[in-house]
Image (cartoon, rainbow, N blue to C red):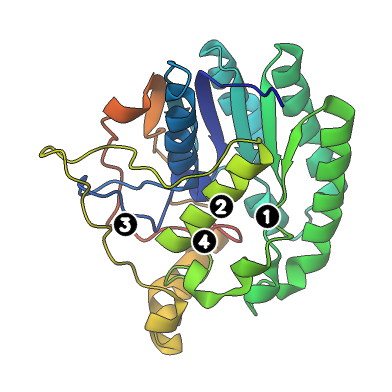
Amino acid sequence: MSRTTYTRYVALGDSITEGLCDPAPARPGTWLGWADRLAGILDGDARLSGHTVEFANLAVRGRRIADVVGEQVPGALALKPDLVSVLVGANDLMSPAADPDALAERLADGVRMLRAHGTTVLLANLFDPQFAFFLKPFRGRAAVFNANIWSIARDHHAVVLDVWGVREFRDPAMWGADRVHLSSRGHRLLAAHAAHALGVPYAETTVVEASDGHEPPMPSTETTDDLPFRTWLRVHAIPWAARRLRGISSGDGLSPKLPQAQPVRTQPLRAQALGTQPRMVGGPH
């Protein structure tokens, strides 16, 4: 069966796509993440037919649908990609007056813009928040939003990355110490599902090789089981709630880590606040 080999991939979204809680091997101070891992898979696949893939990651923690549609989509179109991934909406749904139908309609505007330029759109729905007790009250909103995602994909011929339906994400090991960002293991799983959604054979790849030509060891990361509840409240939950009340985001003032499309194997990821407390993602950011 014939399929598309992509040449330029741009990732849009918030901190899940920025890659928080997935430290990059051999690049201290940087995040990797599922989209960067997917870029490596796509590049490896393209090289089988003598091509390479360029990649840009415009996602920034804390961003909302309006940010993606108003800023990131035009930025992506300027790069002339043939593939764009979009995973966003969790931050919006945390607002008290959030309307999942209206939010989905706004997101559809962005998908329409991308498709009008012939770009393949990989459109992700949201994680099922039942894994975190403090996010369960938003499960109904997320379900309505996700139902809209399928309709948007049908109407605009986008590819759906169905993260809601991945049962493995119920495993605490898939989540970082803040309980709402993916761990490195979770990011690898999401990249694999993204590749399968695109019809690309999945194989683990090293996005950037170590200087000595040997693959560097993956750094260990804390998961939800590693952090006592009281510590989690003090380190993650309370600071997030305080920022939310003040109407600020940990992404304020930050720019994308990969704003220009570059060959996958030569990307010098910008060090971006690895030591800063990440905002909650997949839930609040």
Quadrant of residue 47 in the image? top left
Marks 2/4: CA–CA distance: 17 Å
Helix, strand or loop for disc 4: loop
The residue pinned by badge 2 equals 190
Task: Say whether residue 90 is left or right of residue 172.
Answer: right
First in sequence: mark 2 vs mark 4: 2
The residue depicted at 38 percent of the width and 43 percent of the height is 205
Callout 3 amino acid: Thr
- The answer to which of 92 and 169 lies nearer the viewer is 169
In x, y percent, where is residue 117? 70, 11
Quadrant of residue 167 in the image? bottom right
Callout 2 amino acid: Leu
The residue pinned by badge 4 equals 280
Marks 2/3: CA–CA distance: 24 Å
In x, y percent, where is residue 182? 49, 61
- Do the residues under discs 2 and 4 have CB atoms within 8 angstroms? no
| Mark nearer the viewer, 2 or 4 | 2
The residue pinned by badge 3 equals 276
Q: Residue furthest front?
A: 1
Marks 3/4: CA–CA distance: 12 Å
First in sequence: mark 1 vs mark 2: 1
- Do the residues under discs 3 and 4 have CB atoms within 8 angstroms? no
In x, y percent, where is residue 184? 41, 59
Marks 4/1: CA–CA distance: 17 Å
Disc 1 crowd, CA 10 A, few/some/many (<14, 14-19, 20+):
some
Helix, strand or loop for disc 3: loop
The residue depicted at 57 percent of the width and 21 percent of the height is 5
The residue pinned by badge 1 equals 163
The residue depicted at 39 percent of the width and 38 percent of the height is 254
